[in-house]
Amino acid sequence: MTRTYAIGDSHGCLAQLQSLVEQCERHAGEGRSRFVFLGDYIDRGPDSRGVLDLLIDLQKWSPDEIVCCWATTKICCSRQLKVKRTRRGGF
């Protein structure tokens, strides 16, 4: 049986995220585990880059079992940023 775990708002807190992932894997036991990471991966915590690196590594090792979603506010902000940069001659 595959267990699915949803984890949201890690906010750059790598140590806590790693601990939570390990706890979920122990909970799944011998079964498979699937993770859905829900937005807000960066800011506030001390290791935003570490969180992103962890998520990228997890996806490389288990692409079918790791899903990363952007927060809706991040999608809206990135669209606004792209529109502003395009108007200014950026990408």
Image (spheres, helix red, strand yellow):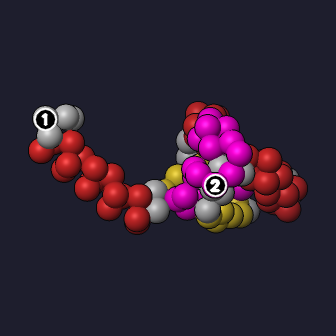
x%, y% of residue 37? 59, 57
| Mark 1 and mark 2 residues within 8 Å of each other at the beta carbon | no
Nearer the observer, 58 or 3: 58
Earlier along the polypeptide chain: callout 1 or callout 2? 2
Measure the alpha-carbon separation of dots 1 and 2. 31 Å
Instruction: Give the residue drawn at x 34%, y 58%.
Output: 77
x%, y% of residue 89? 13, 35
Instruction: Give the residue drawn at x 61%, y 37%.
Output: 49
Give the number of marks: 2
The quadrant where residue 5 appears: bottom right
Instruction: Locate the C terminus by quadrant.
Output: top left
Instruction: Give the residue drawn at x 32%, y 61%.
Output: 76
Nearer the observer, 22 or 15: 15
Nearer the observer, 91 or 52: 91
The quadrant where residue 80 appears: bottom left
Q: Which residue was labeled with disc 1?
A: 89
Q: Secondary structure at mark 1?
A: loop
Q: Is residue 11 visible?
A: yes
Q: Residues within 10 Å of mark 2 (few under 14, many from 20)?
A: few
Disc on res. 44: 2
The magenta span reads: 31-54
Residue sitting farthest toward the front: 88
x%, y% of residue 38? 55, 61
Task: Name which residue type carries label 1.
Answer: Gly
| Residue 35 lies in the magenta-colored region | yes
| Residue 10 lies in the magenta-colored region | no
